[in-house]
Image (cartoon, coloured by chain):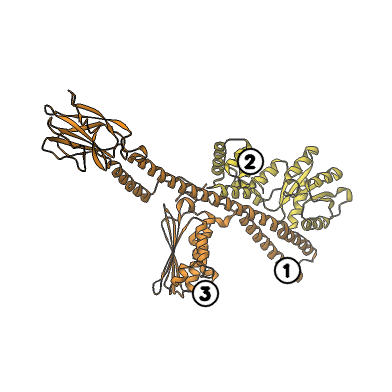
Chain colours: A yellow, B orange
Amino acid sequence: MSASAAARIRVLSVDDHPLLREGISAMVKSQPDMELVAEASTGKEGIDRFREHQPDITLMDLRLPDMNGIEAMATIRAEFPEARVIILTTFEGDVEIQRALEAGARGYLLKSMPPKELLDGIRQVHAGKKRIPAEIVAHLAEHLSDETLTVREVEVLRQVAGGNRNRDIAEHLFISEETVKVHVKHVMDKLGASDRTEAVAIALRRGIIQL
Amino acid sequence: MTWRPRLPSEAVTRTLCVVAGFLAALVATGSRRMIAASAIEFSLVPPEAAGGTEQLASIEGRVTAPGPGQRIVLYARSGDWYVQPYANAPFTAIQGDGRWRSPTHLGTEYAAVLVDAEYRPPAKASTLPGIGGGVAAVAVTDGVPPWWKTGWFRLAGLVAAALAAFGLHRYRLQKLAHELDARSLERLTERTRIAQELYDTLLQGFLSASMQLHLAVDQLPEGSPDRARLDQALAVMGRATDEGRRVLHGLRCGNSDAERLESAFERLPQGLPSEAVGDYKVTVAGESRRLHPIIRDEVYRVGREAVMNAFRHAQARAVAVEIEYSPRGLRVAVRDDGRGIDSRVLASSREGDGGLSGMRRGAAGIGARLRIRSGSGVGTLVELSVPGSVAFQGPADGPRRLETGA
């Protein structure tokens, strides 16, 4: 492969973990048709580096110290609708994947994939295709028929996860305790949980809420 | 939420019935007594009082078919019987319709005596005159007790006390259930944080190392022996990463919380040296139910301590763990054929008593009852009971949703 400097795929890597950035950097730099133009360790830094370099491909981690990778991606895409962002993360819950794809991710790759597949994924997305691994698709399909929680229900669930009692939640959200109870019941029904703790556990696993 | 209101159990119902019967008897003791078959009735009875000359009250009644000239003599009791309303005015006339009415001083009891015209009543007597000799009928009644002494008031008081006790019991169970919920939530968030931290350090580093190793391997010529060895190392790393991810996932989502108590007990000997474990078996009665994770862990801890004590200190050859699920609650009994626990140790609660105090503390912390029976030659029975409202999560036989892990 002998690509001229102009035709190289220009990559931005956004990940808060230095060791992992090192791995990505080594991987990208080993490819003659790719070039690592910048690295960032926070969402805000990622947005700044994007504005600066306008890379062809942005590899975005979901968990960043200052904001969620999806938010950072949405901010970038609002400014640069053509931006091609690949979420590069470890396995996350179906809801998080769904949100990432809805927010315009062009690919969803797992850090545990062999580098060859990761690099192929980058090339495919650069060529205008979408790249979502089969196991992710299968995982998404599993919850396809599940009822989604309303914004309010997620809010209540987040409060439950914070160890709040119904009374506290009612106070925080300016609603009645009865309403809180109804929300909690709906959440449990929708998630198939038998109690509050299980509801929180399922929500954490599926990426509906984060701690 | 773990708390569900329950119908009072059979024992509670039985107790309430006994209490109600007792109370009904109590109410009935304020009855009126007739000494003669002739009918003197009281329609207004003054209050019960020690007696004295200061206070007067009305007493009223009726006589059915009095003889001609007959009249009423009233007495009030204050130790002895005193004629009423005054010693010099002992008679009360009967009206045409049989009614009579008079003022009287207060007493503990009141009596109305139906007498012939010529009868001369004693002004004071230790006993009431009997029938005959001019006395046609005698009726006695208790003074009306003050409201706080009435049977109904006592009944109401006892019922209120019983309700308060029941309410307190419920409140404590409810509070315990809330506490347990809070504790398991705390544990879940703590675990999630640990998982997060491990993920941030170990897993990410591992993934990075794996990526770089992959790249290095790709540089090696196809078919070189080094490449085969490194490929193998990479495969191991891949498996370790997957495994680690699964463990973190389990930590984060509290998958281990779904384990049943019986399987935990069945796995117990795995952690012990095989020569230390004799005959060990676990039996389950009733339909296995999902337990609150905190309860399950605590019950397991107490049960494990009992099993360890049996094998380690009591030199038991056989230990049986019985787990019983019933609507009332969870009961776990650990029975052994060892040499028993010294009764002095059993009675004491100091440290170094073979984990007994720890077991007691553990049981108390989850609102459970711990009973230990032991004797030399008969072995030891450690019995732990937890009320159902605290112990159980979800319905008895509801389908348990299987969560597919990633």
Q: Residues within 10 Å of mark 1 (few under 14, many from 20)?
A: some
Residue matched to label 3: B274
Give the foreground label among 3 and 2: 2
For label 2, the SS is helix
Q: Is residue B188 visible?
A: yes
Does the CB distance between marks 2 and 1 fall below 8 Å?
no
Q: Amino acid at mark 3?
A: Ser
- In this rendering, the count of numbered labels is 3
Chain under callout 1: B
Q: Is residue B237 above or below residue A152?
A: below
In front of the other: B102 or A127: B102
Q: Which residue is mark 2?
A: A155
Contact (Cβ within 8 Å) of mark 3 with mark 2: no
Quadrant assignment, res B212: bottom right
Kind of residue sitting beneath label 2: Glu
Local crowd at mark 2 within 10 Å, few (<14), some, or many (≥20)? some
Q: Identify the residue position indicated by label 1 in the image.
A: B228
Q: Are marks 2 and 1 on the same chain?
A: no
Which of disc 3 and disc 1 is earlier in sequence?
A: 1
Instruction: Please state the horizontal and vertical placement of residue B190, each as a whole percent of the image.
Output: 64, 54
Residue at the (39%, 42%) spot, across then down: B157
State the residue in front, B339 or B145.
Answer: B145
